[in-house]
Image (tube, coloured by chain):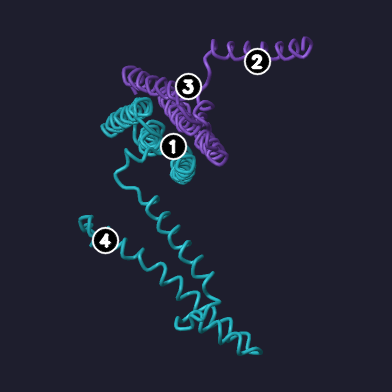
Chain colours: A cyan, B purple
Amino acid sequence: MIADGSVLDTVAHVAAAVMLLAGSFLAMVAGIGIARFPDLLARMHAATKPQVLGLALLMGGLALEIRTGVVIWTLVLVVALQLITAPVSAHMVGRAGYRTSQVRSDLLVVDELTDDLAVIERMADREGAAGRQTPAPSSSTGPSAGGGDDLVQGPEDQAGTSAKAEAVEEEVLATQDPEPHDGAHEDTHEPPSGRG
Amino acid sequence: MSLGVAIACGVMIAIGAACAVVRAERGPSMLDRVVAVDVVVATVLAAVAIVSAWTLRSDLVPVLVVLALVGFIGSVTVARFAAADKDDDKRILTREEAAAEREARRRAELEESDGGGRS
């Protein structure tokens, strides 16, 4: 333990004061931000400040003030709980906000969810149209040929189902094809991360 | 921890909490209010931490654990049951508006019973 009145004790006190002040400042900033920002996502952005960084700073300052093993581990538990639960609640609130159309799309710089939903809707439309046309003789494509084989090979159920599964997989891969392209395209926007 | 640091922290936390409460009152939708309440919970956590650091009381630390859990449960519950409100249903009525609405409803009921009697 650090003796009272030693240099380390003073350093710990000063560091604790700085951390507590910083955490309180983040709480104030979050309050001002949440009162002034225009829409739900911006307010959520402001609300995260005291929930994660502010809390970590405050707990660090408190741990430096009360230097006991039990207290320090309890404070670590508090920060860990908050780190686990804050993203979950933020995710659910953001999702609910999107679904109940409280996200102002004119303020968004990037809106990947709307683009993806449009792509999925188009895919579903195409699949629905294809499903209605499958009885017609369009046996040139892979999936329908597999289905025909399945009908012919009566007893060999397993082979038939595996062929079907393969066909479905192919279809899924074919329909998902645009997405990797999008991802690669977006990756080029970002500067290369400094990993390694 | 000196008194000046404690007072500065307390003032900043109070400003943050007051702004969050304003948003919780004004916030146009339920989700805005829930986010504001989350911030209030975070500021209460900060206040408990400041009190604990000022008085060197370690028995307040379990309170921090409980608060960190309870704020999460509240916001997840409200987000789970969030529905798309009509513009009119979103806001809280002022006292005058609520009184006027009640008055209009009562008058409509009276008129209905009166009209039924006359015609």
What residue is rendered at 39% in x and 22% in y?
Answer: B19
Picture coordinates of residue B68, whole percent (x, y): 49, 36
Point out the frontmost of discs 1 and 2: 2
Q: Earlier in the sequence, mark 4 or mark 1?
A: 1
- Kindly identify which numbered label has been placed on residue B25: 3
Circle 4 is placed at which residue position? A185
Circle 1 is placed at which residue position? A102
What residue is rendered at 53% in x and 75% in y?
Answer: A134
Mark 1 vs mark 2, CA separation in Å: 31 Å
Per the image, label 1 sits on a secondary structure element best described as loop
Q: Chain of mark 4?
A: A
Asked if disc 4 and disc 1 are in contact, CB closer than 8 Å, the reply is: no
Mark 4 neighbour class, 10 Å CA radius: few under 14, some 14 to 19, many 20 or more: few
Per the image, label 3 sits on a secondary structure element best described as helix
Point out the frontmost of discs 2 and 3: 2
- Kindly identify which numbered label has been placed on residue B105: 2
Q: Are marks 1 and 3 on the same chain?
A: no
Q: Quadrant of the C terminus of chain A?
A: bottom left
Q: Chain of mark 3?
A: B
